[in-house]
Image (cartoon, rainbow, N blue to C red):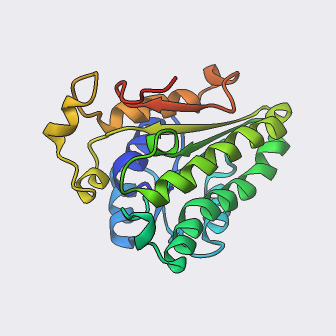
């Protein structure tokens, strides 16, 4: 999901490199068609902020691919904002785009995964879900809730051989970073690794979580951030 650019595109490319058949979605028809052609993926146009869109795109992807083993829930981040500047409508829009799209996609994917007794669900969140980032009130609030969903759901589906994990990007060199006006040089000085991460750094770990080798890793929120987070 959300794979026309950035982390979503990199994860799709990493899975394809491992031999997976992949369907990708995004709201921009021209962009998703171009990326699907570039990667050799199935491209589906979908605006994940629309009610019911996430479940429909999972159903279409499953139909095109002949089933579904891996679901990567990835949506664009909500706009930067402080609490006082967010309206009720802004909260609802972010909730639909971040929270309900994840719920809808997972709900649609689970029956097939349960039937085949195998599945991988990876929810892309953010380091903001663990240590709030200034001016990202919407992301700080809603993504933290997704971690609770991931952990609780993992307990319910573990006996069906389905793993559910959250993967937190730190500062990765994507269009999102540019949109948030992050100073790359300044940000690099705060990262113990000494550099901003690449989408490929992040995608490599997503591919591992999707693999059979990761079949005993579930209910976790794992960071790929070059050491930025201060907490354990």
Residue at (40% x, 72% y) in the render: 85
Image-quadrant location for residue 48: bottom right
**Hey, which quadrant is residue 189 in on the image?**
top left
Q: Is residue 50 left or right of residue 155?
A: left
Residue at horizontal 57 percent and vertical 75 percent from the top: 50
- Of residue 225 and residue 32, the one placed in the foreground of this image is 225
The count of marks equals 0
Q: Is residue 5 visible?
A: yes
Q: Furthest-left residue in view? A: 185
Q: Nearer the viewer, residue 112 or 145?
A: 145
Query: Which residue is the extreme one toward the front?
Result: 84
Q: Residue at x 29, y 36 (%)?
A: 198
Asked if 59 appears above or below 113 in the picture, the reply is: below
Give percent across and percent down for residue 17: 43, 33
Q: Is residue 60 visible?
A: no
| Residue 167 locus on image (x, y percent) | 52, 37
From this view, report whether residue 154 is shown above or below residue 86: above
Q: Is residue 139 above or below residue 150?
A: below
x, y percent for residue 22? 52, 48
Q: Quadrant of residue 224?
A: top left
Nearest to the observer: residue 11 or residue 60:
11
Q: Left or right? Give the position of 217 relative to 27.
A: right
Q: Position of residue 159 (x, y in %)?
A: 86, 32
168 or 25, nearer to the observer: 168
């Amino acid at each position: 999901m959300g794979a026309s650019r950035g982390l979503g595109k990199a994860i799709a490319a990493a899975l394809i490199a491992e031999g997976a058949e992949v369907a990708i979605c995004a709201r921009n028809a021209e962009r998703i068609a171009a990326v699907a052609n570039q990667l050799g993926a199935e491209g589906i146009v979908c605006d994940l902020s629309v009610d019911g869109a996430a479940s429909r795109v999972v159903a279409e992807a499953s139909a095109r691919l002949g089933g579904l083993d891996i679901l990567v829930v990835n949506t664009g981040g909500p706009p930067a904002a402080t609490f006082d500047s967010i309206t009720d409508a802004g909260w609802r829009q972010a909730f639909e785009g971040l929270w309900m799209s994840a719920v809808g996609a997972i709900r649609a994917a689970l029956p097939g995964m349960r039937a085949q007794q195998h599945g991988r669900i990876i929810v892309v969140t953010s380091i903001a879900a663990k240590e709030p980032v200034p001016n990202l009130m919407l992301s700080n609030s809603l993504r933290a809730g997704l971690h609770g969903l991931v952990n609780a759901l993992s307990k319910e589906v573990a006996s069906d051989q389905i793993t559910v994990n959250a993967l937190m990007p730190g500062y990765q060199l994507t269009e999102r970073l540019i949109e948030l006006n992050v100073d790359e040089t300044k940000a690099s000085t705060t990262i113990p690794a000494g550099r901003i991460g690449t989408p490929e750094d992040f995608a490599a770990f997503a591919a591992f979580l999707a693999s059979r080798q990761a079949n005993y890793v579930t209910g976790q929120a794992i960071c790929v951030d070059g050491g930025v987070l201060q907490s354990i």
